Image: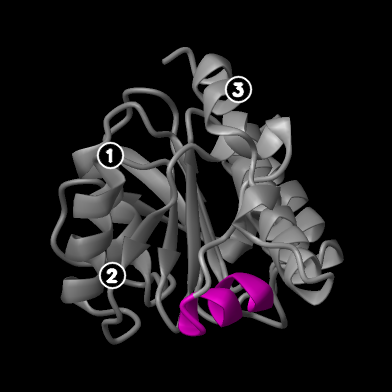
Amino acid sequence: MDLWAQLARAGRTAVEGGLVVGSGGNLSAREPGSSEFIVTNRGEWLDRLDSPSFSTMSVHGDDPPQGTTPSVEWRLHQLTYRSRPDVNAIVHLHPQLVVLLDAAQVPIRQITTDHVVYLGEIGCVDYHQPGSVDLAADAARVACDHDVMVLRRHGSSALGHDVDMALRRALNLGEAAVMTYQSLALGCGPEIRFPAKDRNELRGA
């Protein structure tokens, strides 16, 4: 399946899962080892993507090619690919509960085995203006040690060696946020988190 088709499928899944509203968020992917990547164009609705919905960008270029209109967050994707040669897909979404919990300074609890396996330690990127070089640079720095990041007051980024893995991580982050919110509503304390001993075993520590 073409990369754009994989991303189009991921976009539909993200919207159906309530992880993004309207044209919020953006997606990208590249072939392993490629110096080019495709990224959603500005203003694209993630459940309505087709081949013309993407721009092709250079991992090392300075400006978008003439005639293209990539997402304003194209640098966020570009600099992450520069810092993580093993990453071939990035799913950047605006999940409401993820952003809300972070704004309320409530750590997202990893409760299930899937949360532990797919999320690892969740990184955090300080607030910067969307589309700015500062945001892209800070996200790329955090990405050096994390596959999943919360962008404060903004959204999340999930990385993967392919589109399916990046999406899987994004979905698990959204689910972990929902379960954190539910556990708080039930009055559960921090002990609801996955036990540290079992977590370390799952991660091979």
Which residue occupies the foreground of this view, 135 or 62?
Answer: 135
**Quadrant in which residue 117 is drawn:** top right
Q: Position of residue 201 (x, y in %)?
A: 54, 15
Position of the C terminus, as image quadrant, is top left
Residue 97 magenta:
yes
Q: Residue at x 60, y 57 (%)?
A: 190
Q: Residue at x 35, y 62 (%)?
A: 124
First in sequence, mark 1 or 3: give its number.
Answer: 1
Q: Are marks 1 and 3 in contact (CB under 8 Å)?
A: no
Q: Residue at x 73, y 71 (%)?
A: 184
First in sequence, mark 2 or 1: give its number.
Answer: 2
Q: Which mark is residue 66?
A: 2
Q: Amino acid at mark 2?
A: Gln
Q: CA distance from mark 1 to mark 3?
A: 22 Å
Q: CA distance from mark 2 to mark 1?
A: 34 Å
Q: Give the SS element for disc 2.
A: loop
* Residue underneath mark 1: 145
Q: Give the SS element for disc 1.
A: loop
Residue 178 magenta:
no
Q: Amino acid at mark 1?
A: Asp
Q: Position of residue 151 (x, y in %)?
A: 40, 70
**Quadrant in which residue 70 is drawn:** bottom left
* Residue underneath mark 3: 198
Q: Amino acid at mark 3?
A: Asp
Q: Position of residue 39 (x, y in %)?
A: 47, 57
Give above or below for 156 relative to 198: below
Look at the image and give the residue range highlighted in magenta: 95-105
